[in-house]
Image: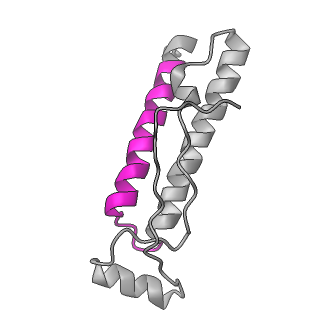
Amino acid sequence: MKENTPEQQLDLLCSQIIRERDHWNYINENGCNDPFWPDGSNINLTRNHIISYKRDIAELCEKTGMPLPEEYFLKVPPEVDMNYMANLKQKARVERLKQQGNELSRKKQRFVDDGQLEFF
């Protein structure tokens, strides 16, 4: 099997950042269906994926001498309360989570992507 070129690897990592940011926004607005974890846990996992992809991009660019792409500088969504739930309409899921001892929160975290890039 042929290995991807560094440029192809970089393109893939950039597209994964975009996909995960969209996924973060989707979960924040609509929730998810994970039967064992609140939406906040899943949204923070998605946030961690973004951070990991950025780290991978930085390592790849440093190793190959390629410039950091624009996606690297996109804002990372904020961390949310682990017990955050986008909605409480999934009655069976909500009950199961409460029985597990989760104190569910509806306090929504806003992610304002104002077009400003983050620089580290």
Colour logic: one colour
Q: Looking at the picture, tell me which residue is in the foreground, 21 or 36.
A: 21
Q: Residue at x 31, y 84 (%)?
A: 92
Height in image: 114 above or below 108? above
User: Could you say where residue 11 lies in the image, as x and y percent from the top left?
Assistant: 47, 20
Q: Residue at x 59, y 49 (%)?
A: 48
Height in image: 55 above or below 37? above
Q: Which residues are magenta?
A: 10-37
User: Could you say where residue 8 lies in the image, as x and y percent from the top left?
Assistant: 49, 15
24 part of magenta stretch: yes
- Res 32 quadrant in image: bottom left
User: Could you say where residue 17 lies in the image, as x and y percent from the top left?
Assistant: 48, 35
- Check the picture and name the quadrant holding the C terminus: top right
29 part of magenta stretch: yes
Image label count = 0
Can you see residue 5? no
User: Could you say where residue 90 lies in the image, as x and y percent from the top left?
Assistant: 29, 77
Residue lying farthest to the top in this orientation? 65
Q: Looking at the picture, tell me which residue is in the foreground, 84 or 101.
A: 84
Residue lying farthest to the bottom in this orientation? 99
Q: Residue at x 55, y 62 (%)?
A: 80
- Res 63 quadrant in image: top right
Q: Residue at x 43, y 74 (%)?
A: 106
Q: Which secondary structure dominates the residues rendered in magenta?
A: helix
Judged left or right of residue 67, residue 96 is: left
Can you see residue 112? yes
Height in image: 49 above or below 91? above
